[in-house]
Image (cartoon, rainbow, N blue to C red):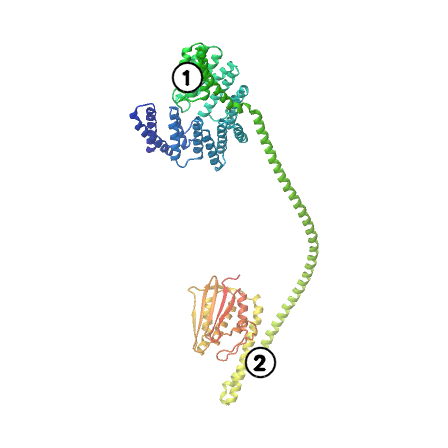
Amino acid sequence: MVYCLYVIHLFIFDFVLVSVYFHSKKPICQLILRILYISLILSIVCSSSCVRHVDRNGSTFSKFDSVCLAADRMSDAGYPGKAFSMVLQAFGTMKDLTLEDKINYYKYCNIIYNHKKEHNKSIELADSLLWVLDRSQESPLVSSARIVAYNIKADALFAMGRYNDAYNYYYVAQRLAVDSKDSCSLRTYTYSLAMTLYRQQRFQQSAQRFQEAFSQSAPCPEDFNLFYFKQEVLDNVGLCYNALAKYDSAMLYYHKALNLINSREGKFDKLPGVYETAKAVVYGNMAEVYMHKGKFDSAERLYEYSIAVNLKKGFTNSDAIVNQTKLAELYFRTGDMVRTKALLTAIEAEFDTIPDKRVEMLWHRLMWKYSERVYDSATGFRHLRNYMLQNEAYEHDRKELMETDLDMRVRDLEKQYQINLLTKDRKQQKAYLIVVTILAGMAIVIVGLVLRNASRSRRNLKIQKALNDTIQKQKEQLEGALAELKNKEKDKTRILRSVAHDVMNPIAAIVSLTDILFYEKESLNEEQLHIINLIREASANSLNLSKDIIEAAEQQEDREHLTMEETDINLLVARAVELLNFRALSKRQQIITRYPAQHIMAVVYKDKIRRVINNLIANAIKFSYEGTVINVSLELREGMAHLSVRDSGIGIPAKNLPYIFDVFTDARQAGTQGEVTHGLGLSISMQIARAHNGDIWVESEEGKGATFHFEFPLKKA
């Protein structure tokens, strides 16, 4: 905050000193002047980055406004060239300028180029501004600035005598203003038309256009530029009525302009000279009215006052030299040749600093008249010739302008605009017609396709109904056949179990009798013992087969009658190992178990899972060699209980692997000690695994043992 205040005070101090030294002509001040000038620029740049300026309406100034304000003050003090250099340097120094900053920069530069009559640079400036605007997001600010750019270009083209091109750009600006309902921008177009009509000496129409421009400026936010525009328009209306010899009306509008200037004097942040020069211009125009009315004393006083003000450095020098020629003519008309000559001599001395072709032409005319009056014909002839040559060139330059029918040109542009709109509408209508035609054709095709598909659908529906009826009949037949098959399956299972039970009783009796005979072996010879042992083993195998058959039959029927319960799988495995360990010891085998750290709890058919575990471990013992190791491992894998039983036995041939889980499979093998297998155990285990939404599979290589994997989910699916 302290730094910002310091910068602001530095800015004010620099500006005051610059103003003082600008008015000083002493050589000793030149070095200090340059240092202060650079300091002023740096102060502006710094201040724009640390403070926000607020305008009269309470809105925030952009960064570049502070630069333009300082430049305006410097220009008002009589140093427009230095002010322009400061603006250029500041614009190149500042960073992160907003779009509003850039627009203000282009506007300021156009004022300078227009004053210096560098119209080509104004055209380049307008094109640059349009390029920036085309790459900016659309907004009211962009729309307004685009209108300004086209007006700048039109003004420059008009000043260069390219009237048709100028009218085209004026009209583009006018259409943009109308389309955007921007009355403030529309006044610029109306003002340009009024100025053109004035140059064509169509004063009545020009006055009407000026009045229209004044009305269009009413809703615009008031600032210094609007105030200056309005007082200038009122003054121009007075000029039109003066040219029409309506002197009372002219004086009325001159007084309106003066009243407006007086009411706004000091309201805007401008040097007093700005208001003073504006009033001096109006007073000079009022003097011409007094001269037409023959009030030469009043005219003389107003001319002298206006000239004294605007002849100062930094004021409207061009207006002052015009009023000097009018005052010289007043002196001539009143017969005061001494002051006429003195004033004409003074005007001639000012041509180098205030060049004006028209004033120079009028000066030659007055010098011709003066020379004729003082009987200096040779000098008078020379001035008459110069006057005629310059007047001829002047009229030649104005010829195209004077021959242009502005109203007709505007009407032509309006008609062309309407034609373009109609052409565009016609193209759109043609495009719409083509689209409608295409859509209509597509609609016809679609309707045809829909009708054809509807006809096909009806036929297909009949066919589908017939097929559905056929399928329904086949389904009923299949359901009947399936029910009959299930009944036969149940009958077969019951018969199988009944037969197994019936067979078990006599076989069990035979086993019991052979056991009794075996215990009385002392009374039997060796051959008899051998026969009894064969009978005993055959009966035992038959008994085991009957048990397997009954187990398989029960596996088919018991699903509907058994209930799942939460079971500790670790205990099931441990109990199975404990019960089967005596078989392993009989073959000098060792069973090594591995359990997870936590007990695995699963909802299962407990007896069925025990059957699978027993079967897998019993098979490992049966098909392993004496003195080998059997590994039993239980673990938890992704929500599944996983049991693996690995032996070091005879293994399974590759050709038998796909069939070992089939019922009554032919892939049966005898154990390492000739143990008989029936092929039902693994089939029953597979059925149990699938009943639990699990699976059993084997990894084996003949002669290198086998690993059986049994996996099932912990909860019922």
Task: Report x, y in % for residue 629.
Answer: 43, 74
Identify the disc placed on residue 96.
none
> Could you classify mark 2 by the number of other residues whose Cα lies within 10 Å: few (under 14), some (14-19), or many (20 or more)?
few
Which residue in the protein does label 2 denote?
A: 506
Q: Is residue 567 above or below residue 32?
A: below
Residue 492 lies left or right of residue 305; in this view the side is: right
Which residue in the protein does label 1 denote?
A: 307
Number of numbered discs present? 2
Q: Secondary structure at mark 1?
A: helix
> Could you classify mark 1 by the number of other residues whose Cα lies within 10 Å: few (under 14), some (14-19), or many (20 or more)?
many
In the rendered image, the quadrant that contains the N terminus is: top left
Q: Residue at x 58, y 68 (%)?
A: 557
Task: Report x, y in % for residue 691.
Answer: 54, 66
Task: Please indicate, yes or no, whether residue 70 appears anywhere in the rendered image.
Answer: no
Q: Is residue 661 above or below residue 279?
A: below
| Residue at the far top in the pictured view | 335
Q: Earlier in the sequence, mark 2 or mark 1?
A: 1
- Considering depth in this image, is 49 or 534 the residue closer to the camera? 49
Q: Secondary structure at mark 2?
A: helix
**Disc 2 residue type (three-letter):** Pro
C-alpha gap between disc 2 and disc 1? 153 Å
- Considering depth in this image, is 340 or 584 the residue closer to the camera? 340
Q: Nearer the viewer, mark 2 or mark 1?
A: 1
Q: Residue at x 48, y 61 (%)?
A: 639
Q: Is residue 405 above or below residue 251?
A: below
**Disc 1 residue type (three-letter):** Ile
Residue 444 lies left or right of residue 670; in this view the side is: right
Task: Report x, y in % for residue 300.
Answer: 43, 12
Q: Residue at x 45, y 65 (%)?
A: 635
